[in-house]
Amino acid sequence: MKVIMGASVAVVLAVTGSASADVCFGPGAGGTILDFPGAGVSSSIVVTPQQSVQIQSIDIMINGLQHTWAGDLLMTLQFNGGPGVNFVNRPGVPATTFGDSTNYGANYTFTDAGPLALDLEAALAPLGDNDVLPPGTYFDPGGSSLGAAFAGQNAAGTWTLTITDLAVGDVGSFTNWNFCVVAVPAPGAAGLLMLGGLVAARRRRA
């Protein structure tokens, strides 16, 4: 989170018209990822109206994710019982029948494509059956956009992560999960910050 104080607030807000900050929620409980055809493991995080912010973009952190054969897994985020967004969708499928054989074994952040996110399929491609995907921030080009699904919505409600194994032969688990949003404050709040910065600047010049 970046906090800018004094006259510089006025400069930033005069250019962008708003301010943004990362706001994180959780953790949600972890669980065991059963082998196919077992049911997926689901875990929810509830955001109260008092905590709520307007969403610009969203990142999902899955901590302690352990699973052999990354191509088995479908990862879905659902908000208030609405349609699930498949943000990781069996990397390596349909190029191969069973997907990528690399293993998960670390903390991972999943998000949309951007300058700070690595292409998940490209990162997995040079690895093999005995390799573990390094921890990092990834986007799945075969998955659906989190931003397209949730940008502009109010975060208050129930967010449910579901991880499902869709191929036989491997099991796994994860420790817990969180999600962070880039939140855009209401225009009134931005205006107050800009006004405060201008007043501070004028006082220094007086």
Image (cartoon, rainbow, N blue to C red):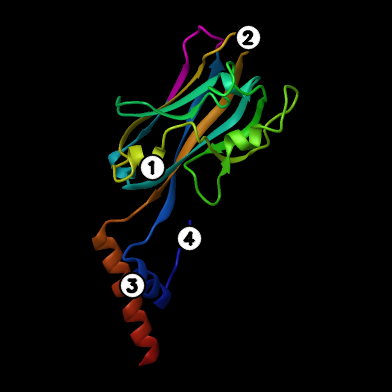
Disc 3 marks which residue? 14
Disc 1 marks which residue? 147
Q: Judge the density around disc 4: few (<14), some (14-19), many (≥20) Cα neighbours within 10 Å.
A: few
Q: Residue type at mark 1? A: Gly
Cα–Cα gap, marks 1 and 3? 25 Å
Q: Position of residue 185 (x, y in %)?
A: 31, 56
**Circle 1/circle 2 CB separation < 8 Å:** no
Residue under the image location 33 percent in, 79 percent down:
198
Q: Nearer the viewer, mark 4 or mark 2?
A: 2
Determine whether the residue tagged by mark 4 lies in a helix, strand or loop: loop
Q: Nearer the viewer, mark 1 or mark 3?
A: 1
For marks 1 and 3, the one nearer the N-term is: 3
**Circle 2/circle 3 CB separation < 8 Å:** no
Left-right relation of 204 to 195: right
Q: Position of residue 200 (x, y in %)?
A: 36, 80
Q: Judge the density around disc 3: few (<14), some (14-19), many (≥20) Cα neighbours within 10 Å.
A: few
**Circle 4/circle 2 CB separation < 8 Å:** no
Magenta-highlighted residues: 34-43
Left-right relation of 7 to 156: right
Q: Is residue 104 magenta?
A: no
Cα–Cα gap, marks 4 and 1? 21 Å
For marks 2 and 3, the one nearer the N-term is: 3
**Against 80, is 14 above or below?**
below
Disc 4 marks which residue? 2
**Against 68, is 181 above or below?**
below
Q: Quarter-wise, where is residue 95 in the image?
A: top right
Determine whether the residue tagged by mark 3 lies in a helix, strand or loop: helix
Determine whether the residue tagged by mark 2 lies in a helix, strand or loop: loop
